[in-house]
Amino acid sequence: LVSTKYMQVRRADGTVFSVLYDFYFYNGMNDGARGFGGATYDTNTGKVLHLPDIVTDLDMFAQAVEDQLFGIFGADVFHRDDIIKEYFEMYGADGTHWTLDYNGITVYFDEGEIADAGFGAISVTITFAENPELFKEKYTAVPEAYIVALPMKSAFYTDLDGDGSCEELS
């Protein structure tokens, strides 16, 4: 039996604290499974935030996710044409599978959840800069500087400049 869980702080400031949970388990009877979850909290109240607390229109946000995913992968790799809409109708407001980052909201899909398992886990970031109308202004204010604690003796990868690629910090 193998079970691991990694936590990555995606944003921590005076407005929100958002963390990504990346977990893997193997029970000896299958190929193992990897999954993601997210939790975002208002740092002033401690209240769990859901997508409707942050985005102005959940349907428009879901459409932006679909447009970006179909643009990257093509619509034919997904289970159905309406899979993204269905996902957001079922799960979009419950506070899981997304994080609020410094440059937007990243949505995470587990392997096989919306596309064939061969595509692995899929994530997409809807940025404040490209979609300002989708976000409540309170959450788009990004601090000029922030600090991240790094684990000792290991590399840490994160997208510091919002260009879509991770930089190595150590």
Image (cartoon, grey):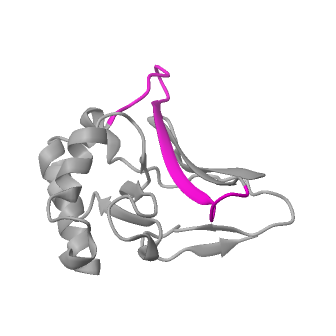
What residue appears at the point 48 percent right and 44 percent down from the top-left corner?
38
Q: Position of residue 71 (x, y in %)?
A: 21, 77
Q: Is residue 90 visible?
A: yes
Q: Nearer the viewer, residue 77 or 71?
A: 77
Closer to the camera, 52 or 15? 52
**Up/down of 139 relative to 32, above or below:** above
Q: Residue furthest front?
A: 29
Residue 22 lies in the magenta stretch:
no
Magenta residues, start to end? 28-50
Residue 31 inside the magenta-drawn segment: yes
Q: Is residue 85 left or right of residue 49?
A: left
Using the image, determine if residue 55 lies above or below residue 101. Answer: above
Instruction: Indicate the position of residue 59 as horizontal and vertical percent values.
Output: 13, 46
As drawn, which residue projects farthest toward the top? 45
Question: In the image, 44: left or right of 28?
Answer: left
Image quadrant of residue 49? top left
Residue at image point 17% right, 52% down: 85
- Residue 19 lies, in percent from the top left, at 54, 44
Can residue 131 be seen here?
no
Left or right: residue 124 compared with residue 77: right
Indicate the quadrant where residue 12 lies: top right
Count the labels in the image: 0
Residue 121 percent across, percent down from the top left? 46, 66
Pick the residue in front: 42 or 28. Answer: 28
Residue at screen point 21% across, 73% down: 70
Q: Quadrant of the C terminus?
A: bottom right
